[in-house]
Amino acid sequence: MERLSSRGRGTRVAATLVVVVLTFAGTVVGNDFWFPFAPFQMFAIADNPNQPIMVLRTDGVDTTGRRIVLDERNAGVRRAEIEAQIDRFKADPSLLRSIQDAYAARNPGKPPLVEVDIVEVQHHLRHAQPTGEITEVVLARWKP
């Protein structure tokens, strides 16, 4: 085994000090963009244990009146994609037509959709435990 040279030790000490300083600065004043030298804020703050948990769902209603949950398999849309653009859909519900078109393309022969909704499902909590109460709020609705 060879010993590390003075220059090698100095380089390692300097690199360690840089990482320590960046991590300290990131912890004190950094934000998510400083990762890995700052904590993700989304994981650093606890939610209120008595506030509802919100989950978005995309629904469609076909010509028979049946309500269908639209997802990646039957409409090619992921919940994360809807969540990322929820403000656009709320401002212009006609954008939901693209989901209806995707559903029709993936489900030939099934009754077409006559309505597409983005629904916020609120799961109510008390002391961080589900109460069983669920509230659904339609955030955006498109009908041809």
Image (tube, grey):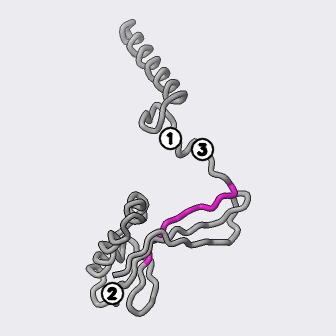
Position of residue 138 measured from the top left corner of the image (x, y, whole percent): 50, 72
**Numbered disc 3: secondary structure:** loop
Q: In the image, 46: left or right of 42? A: right
Q: Which badge, 3 or 2, is on the more N-terminal residue? A: 3
Position of residue 45 measured from the top left corner of the image (x, y, whole percent): 60, 44
Residue 45 numbered tag: 3
Amino acid, disc 1: Phe
Q: Give the residue furthest to the front.
A: 91
**Bounds of the magenta segment:** 49-59
Residue drawn where x is 29% and y is 75% of the image: 102
**Residue bearing the label numbered 1:** 40
Between marks 3 and 2 in the image, the one whose residue lies nearer the viewer: 2
The quadrant of the image that shows the C terminus is: bottom left
Q: Residues within 10 Å of mark 3 (few under 14, many from 20)?
A: few
Q: Which badge, 3 or 1, is on the more N-terminal residue? A: 1
Instruction: Kindly indicate whether the residue at mark 1 contacts the one at mark 3 (C-beta within 8 angstroms).
Output: no
Q: For the stretch drawn in magenta, what is the main secondary structure?
A: strand
Amino acid, disc 3: Ile
Amino acid, disc 2: Pro
Q: In the image, 66: left or right of 144? A: right
Answer above or below: position of 45 versus 63: above
